[in-house]
Image (cartoon, rainbow, N blue to C red):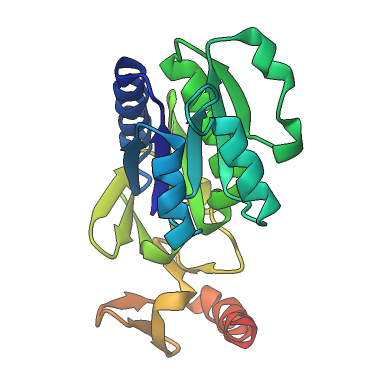
Amino acid sequence: MYRVAVCENNRHERKNIDKLCNEILSESGFPFRVTSFCGADELLCVLEENPFAFDLLILDIRMEPLSGMELARRLRAEGNRVSIIFATGYEEYLREGYDVQPIQYLLKPITKEALHKAINVDLQLNHIPKAISLSYGNKSVFLETDQIIYLESQNHNVYIWMKDEVRSFRMSLRQAQEYLPDSQFCRCHNSFIVNMAWIRHLSHSEILLKTGQTLPVGRSYYRALQSNLVRYLNRI
């Protein structure tokens, strides 16, 4: 779950950023929650109770009584490394605050394209190791690796069987495998790739998954699968 806090004292701008965040993250397929705050002091109260409440803060710089810059510096002084994107309508602020290591500065009015790029930077730097990014056309879809049970190739499509849904993509299984961390996923058949975290039992001919489902094991894949599974189990 990617948790975003939008902190902006201008009601119109706050609603716009909230709307853009919801559009961008809905299109990505990455699980998310966006929470809006009208002041930095309000957000600070939440963070004092739970410093890990959010993965990303989108902060207006000019707010009263506590500015977004002051909030960021206070968080960094306390050792909080939450990702920060600053939003400002004044170019003179673009030189400030690099000591708090923000992901990006965005000039108002914020566009969807600029915010999309900034969010993608944070996802790639800090969150994608727990997910895969599948690109097709002009879109990128993020899927949490722990939620993926297995992939199946069928009629030139790849079906990704997840804990709560099935997603389909127009690509080959070989192409899909390039996006997967080989430390966690292994080919077990010409038509299947399995997430080793979901394997309950392995035999020469089939895999019993923790869901109760079974997958076939191709004869030529068994030894590599067995070796990779032992390596995976020794690592976790």
Q: Nearer the viewer, residue 157 or 58?
A: 58
Q: Which x, y percent locates residue 233?
A: 57, 85
Q: 235 left or right of 139?
A: right
Asked if residue 224 is positioned above or below residue 28 in the image, the reply reads below
Horizontal side of 160 relative to 145 (left or right) equals left
Which quadrant would residue 166 be assigned to in this image? Answer: bottom left
Tell me if residue 54 can be seen.
Answer: yes
**Which image quarter holds the N terminus?**
bottom left
Residue at 71% across / 38% down in the picture?
101
Q: Residue 13 appears at what percent x and percent y?
A: 36, 17
- Say which residue appears at 36% left-offset and 38% top-offset: 170
Q: Position of residue 201 (x, y in %)?
A: 40, 90
- Report the side of 86 relative to 158 (left or right): right
Please indicate whether residue 44 sits to the left or right of residue 168 in the image: right
Task: Tell me the residue at 50%/31% (across/down).
Answer: 59
Q: Is residue 87 above or below residue 7?
A: above
